[in-house]
Image (cartoon, rainbow, N blue to C red):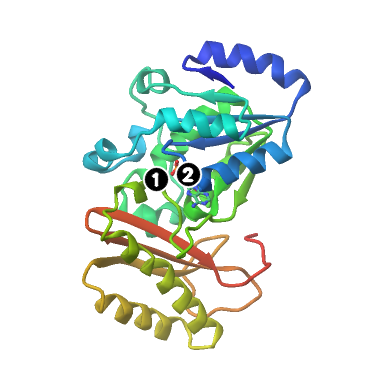
Amino acid sequence: MFIFEDIIDLKNHLKVEKQQYSIGFVPTMGALHQGHLSLIDRAKADNDVVVCSIFVNPTQFNNVEDLKNYPKTIKEDKKLLEAHHCDVLFLPDAHTMYPVPAKTSFSFGHLEQTMEGEHRAGHFNGVALVVSKLFHLIKPHRAYFGQKDLQQFIIIHQLVQDLLFDLEVVCCPIVREDDGLAMSSRNLRLTASQRPIASKLYEALMLARHSLLEGYGVSKTKQTIQNFFNDLSDLQLEYFEVVKSATLETVDSVSDTFQVSLCIAAFLGDVRLIDNVFLFDKKGIF
Ligand code: AMP
C-alpha cells in the first residue's frame, strides 16, 4: 500500500494509475472497523485501484470536545487496510487540507436543516467542503459511503449532481455488531457498562419498523418510541424521524411507493450515537 501525506505525491501517483485503471475512493476519519472495511471491499470489487483517505476533518465538528476525543488508531488502521488490499492511503494533515482558512460555504436547503444538520450546526458544510477537496484531488470513478450516515450520503449525492463531479456515489449497507449496534468509531468511547445499553438504539428502530409495518401510523409509532426512551434513563433521545429516504422529508404516513427511512440519534453519557433503517426490504433509495 502506498501512503501519501502530501498532495503532490498523491497526484503524481494517481496521474499514472488513472490512465489505465478505474479508481474507487473511500473517505474516512480513521479508527477503522468492519463498517469502513466493507466499503473498502466493495470498492475493491468494483474498481482496479482503491484509495482510502483518513482525515479527521476539523470543519465538520461543531463540538471541540468531540473533535479532541475522536479516536485515533492509525497503526491498526494501516494494518487493516493492508489486509483488505487497499492500494493507496491518503493521510493529510489539517494544513494540507486547509492551507488557508476556508471561506466557501454550501447550503443544501432542507437536506441540511433536518436531523443531523439541525443538531450539528455547520456539520454538512464541513463535510461538503472536505469531500469536494478530496474529489478534486483524487478524481475517483466511484466513491463509497455508508448508509450509516444516510443524510451525509444524500447530501453528497446532491453535491455531485450540483457540481457535475464526474463520478458515481455508492451507498453501502450498515455493518452491525451481533446485538444490532451499528459499528462506529465512536463506539470505542463507550464504557463496558454503556456498551450493552447502546444496542437499545437498534431495538428502538426495530420496534418502530414493526409498528409501521403493522399499520400503526407515524404519529402513534413516534409516541411508542418516545415511551420506549422514557423508560431508559441512560439513553437520551435527541430525535426520531420517519422520512422519505431520497429527500429526507418527514412523512405523515408511509406507503411502499417510495423508500422510507427511520432515523434516530441519542446520547449515551457524552457519546452521541446515530442509526437508521430502511422500512422496506429490497427497495432502493431513489
Ligand atoms: P467515518 O470515518 O465515520 O467518517 O465514516 C467513513 C465512512 O464509513 C462513511 O461513509 C460512513 O457512513 C461509513 N460507515 C461508518 N460506519 C459504518 C457502518 N457501521 N457500516 C457501513 N458503513 C459505515
Task: Give the number of the disc on residue 33.
Answer: 2
Picture quarter with the C terminus:
bottom right
Distance from Cα at disc 2 to Cα at disc 1: 7 Å
Instruction: Give the image location of residue 158, x and y in percent.
Output: 56, 47
The amino acid on which the numbered mark 1 sits, given as a three-letter code, is Ser
Asked whether residue 171 is in view, the answer is: yes
The reply, left or right, for residue 61 in relation to residue 247 is left
Instruction: Give the image location of residue 114, x and y in percent.
Output: 39, 59
Q: Are marks 2 and 1 in contact (CB under 8 Å)?
A: yes
- Count the numbered circles shown: 2
- The residue that appears at 51% across and 81% down in the rendered structure is 210
Instruction: Give the image location of residue 102, x and y in percent.
Output: 36, 26
Tell which of 85 and 6 is nearer to you. 85
Classify residue 49 by image quadrant.
top right
Q: Identify the residue position indicated by label 1 in the image.
A: 185
Local secondary structure at mark 2: loop
The reply, left or right, for residue 229 in relation to residue 213 is left
* CB at disc 2 and ligand 1 closer than 8 Å: yes
- The residue that appears at 68% across and 37% down in the rendered structure is 44
* CB at disc 1 and ligand 1 closer than 8 Å: yes
Relative to 73, residue 242 above or below: below
Relative to 28, residue 238 above or below: below
Instruction: Give the image location of residue 156, x and y in percent.
Output: 54, 44
Picture quarter with the N terminus:
top right
The amino acid on which the numbered mark 2 sits, given as a three-letter code, is His
